């Protein structure tokens, strides 16, 4: 299902918007999300380097479609993991900051390393 949705949203902008509206919480408008994201990023600046960096998604209520997709990002089967990551990556407009805020740093870091958005430590392969 994730692969079919991924192909659909890559080719159809209206479908991408519809899937994004379904995956991300209905109360989380882009402006509300931007405010929460700005507040979260400001916390990191004021609290210094000792603060854990958004290890969990900013707002993914348990049992929602996005919560389930985020769980698939750490699935044992690499094909399932990769397709869930790719789907969420496309829904975030291929924006690394939005991807991290919507999925959580711990969930996003490996995928971002594969995409070349962050430098992975020596010996870690994609």
Image (tube, rainbow, N blue to C red):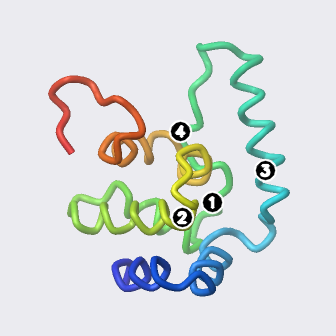
- Are the residues at dot 1 and dot 4 in contact (C-beta closer than 8 Å)? no
Of mark 1 and mark 2, the one earlier in the sequence is: 1
CA–CA distance between discs 1 and 4?
12 Å
37 vs 77: above or below: above
Q: Please name whichever residue, 17 or 82, is drawn nearer the observer in this view of the structure.
A: 17
Mark 1 is surrounded, within 10 Å at the Cα level, by few (under 14), some (14 to 19) or many (20 or more) other residues, namely many
Q: Identify the disc placed on residue 34.
A: 3
The residue at 28%/68% (across/down) is: 80
Q: Is residue 61 left or right of residue 96?
A: right
CA–CA distance between discs 2 and 4?
14 Å
Q: Position of residue 67 (x, y in %)?
A: 54, 64
Question: What secondary structure is found at the residue carrying circle 1?
Answer: loop
Q: Identify the disc placed on residue 60.
A: 1
Question: What secondary structure is found at the residue carrying circle 4?
Answer: loop
Of mark 3 and mark 4, the one earlier in the sequence is: 3
Q: How many marks?
A: 4
Mark 2 lies on residue:
67
CA–CA distance between discs 2 and 3?
19 Å
Q: Quadrant of the C terminus?
A: top left
The residue at 67%/13% (across/down) is: 48
The residue at 56%/51% (across/down) is: 95
Mark 4 is surrounded, within 10 Å at the Cα level, by few (under 14), some (14 to 19) or many (20 or more) other residues, namely some
87 vs 111: above or below: below
Q: Identify the disc placed on residue 55.
A: 4
CA–CA distance between discs 3 and 4?
18 Å
CA–CA distance between discs 3 and 1?
15 Å
CA–CA distance between discs 1 and 2?
5 Å
Q: Position of residue 97 (x, y in %)?
A: 59, 43
123 vs 49: above or below: below
Question: What secondary structure is found at the residue carrying circle 2?
Answer: helix
Which corner quadrant of the image does residue 20 belong to? bottom right
- Are the residues at dot 1 and dot 2 in contact (C-beta closer than 8 Å)? yes
């Amino acid at each position: 299902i994730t692969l079919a949705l991924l192909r659909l949203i890559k080719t159809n902008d209206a479908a991408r918007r519809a899937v994004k509206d379904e995956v991300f919480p209905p109360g989380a408008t882009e402006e509300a999300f931007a405010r929460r994201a700005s507040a979260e990023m400001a916390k990191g600046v004021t609290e210094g380097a000792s603060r854990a960096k958004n290890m969990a998604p900013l707002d993914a209520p348990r049992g929602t479609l996005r919560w389930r997709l985020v769980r698939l990002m750490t699935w044992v089967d690499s094909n399932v993991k990769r397709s869930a990551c790719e789907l969420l990556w496309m829904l975030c407009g291929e924006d690394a900051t939005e991807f991290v805020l919507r999925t959580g740093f711990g969930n996003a870091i490996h995928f971002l390393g594969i995409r070349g958005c962050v430098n992975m430590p020596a010996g870690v392969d994609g």
